[in-house]
Image: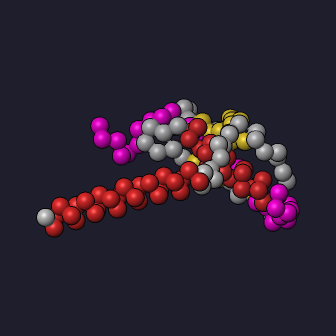
Amino acid sequence: MLLRLAAAALAALGAAYVALHVAHLASHPADAAMTYMRAQWTEFAVPWEGGHPYRAFAYADGSFPARECAAGTVPVIYVPGNAGDYAQARSLGHELASAQHSAWREGQGAEDCYHMPVIATHLNEEFSAFDAR
């Protein structure tokens, strides 16, 4: 009898929790907004010795205007993992461009700004040393 009463009380508490959680979510919509990327890739001319078929691309995001940065340039090299693609770097590139644009909007000028170009390597989606084959 006591076990049935405890189970009923636990079920009632669970139902109340779910109801309150759903009500909270309905009254507080998520603050996340849809992000849009306008990826622009520019191929580098890389002098590979031995005629390797690999390439490199620079990412630019057309969503934000290009800005000059007096503090310097810090290149970000993206090397995809096992059978990865160079286009996976667009999320990283977009976030860096978005952060730089936000800093400019908040009043930070060119003297505090670092230009961080994303350069992604294209390894033809080859398998790495960690392939299980």
Count of numbered circles on the image? 0
Q: Residue at x 82, y 61 (%)?
A: 106
Q: Is residue 72 left or right of residue 54?
A: right
The rendered magenta stretch, by its main secondary structure, is classed as loop
131 vs 55, nearest the viewer: 131
Q: Is residue 71 magenta?
A: no
- Rendered view: 85 above or below 105: above
Q: Is residue 129 magenta?
A: yes
Q: Position of residue 34 (x, y in %)?
A: 65, 43
Q: Position of residue 123 (x, y in %)?
A: 52, 37
Q: Position of residue 36 (x, y in %)?
A: 68, 39
- Rendered view: 71 above or below 33: below
Residue 44 seen from this side: no
Locate the N terminus by quadrant. bottom left
Q: Residue at x 48, y 52 (%)?
A: 22
Q: Position of residue 40 (x, y in %)?
A: 71, 36
